[in-house]
Image: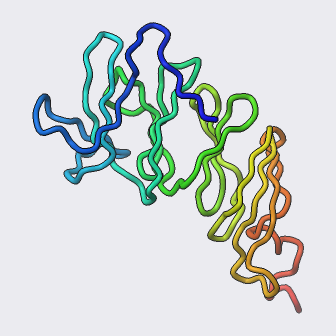
Amino acid sequence: MINYYCDKMTTEKRYEILNSLPTYGPMYIPVSESGEPFYSEGFVVRFNKTDGTNWVANIQPGFTDFKQIIEFEHTHNLLVIACGKCYLINPNYTKPISVFGFGYSKIFNASNNRYVLQDDTGLTIIEPDGSHWNTVRISWDGIKVLHVENNMVTGFSFCPTNETEEWDSFTYDLDTRKLIGGSYYIYDKKKSWWKLW
């Protein structure tokens, strides 16, 4: 279960997801990876600052339908997932701390207050302080039936060159960062065609 932590300093939530851009009030602020403004409607969120004021962000989306906001227990920062693209944001500031990814489709709880983000080729691990790191590439193009228990991630990765099955199983240990299986590295021990002679 994902923890939506409320700031102990105030009873007001640090954010509110809006259905659309507001038609009145202060102008929204576009938030993008490049810092350049964009003019289509993205993921619209009102952030509440610790001084009691607020601002509305129009956050540039990624390439999936996945939207969610994660609150951390020991930091004021928020992980904003805007249609598969991640923004680490402190509600007191209009510029994101970091921006990464573009095609995340799911998020899972893991051991030690970590989260696991899934895209089509690999995983991104979010640490309790909001920092993140990526696994090696696991799949050519597609991951499914992902299961996360404690520090182990298991699932299936798509293999377009496999003649017997389309999906290869894999296991990833979050503590040791070791991958077993996966379609991307399944042929590592086989000789390449140009080394056959």
x and y percent of residue 157 in the render? 72, 67
Q: Is residue 180 left or right of residue 12?
A: right
Residue located farthest toward the top when viewing the structure as drawn: 9
x and y percent of residue 54 in the render? 26, 22
**Does residue 159 sit above or below 150 in this rendering?**
below
Q: Residue at x 68, y 63 (%)?
A: 144
Q: What is the quadrant of the C terminus in the image?
A: bottom right
Q: Which residue is drawn at 28% across and 12% down?
A: 52
x and y percent of residue 134 in the render? 65, 47
Which of the pair 18/53 is nearer the observer?
18
Q: Which residue is drawn at 69% across and 66% down?
A: 139
x and y percent of residue 126 in the render? 62, 37
Total numbered labels: 0
Residue located farthest toward the left when viewing the structure as drawn: 24
The structure's colour scheme is: rainbow
Q: Residue at x 80, y 38 (%)?
A: 150
Q: In this view, does 18 lie to the left or right of 77?
A: left
Which of the pair 130/66 is nearer the observer?
66
Q: Quadrant of residue 37?
A: top left
Q: In which quarter of the image is residue 92?
A: top left
Q: In this view, does 82 lie to the left or right of 141?
A: left
Q: What is the quadrant of the N terminus in the image?
A: top right
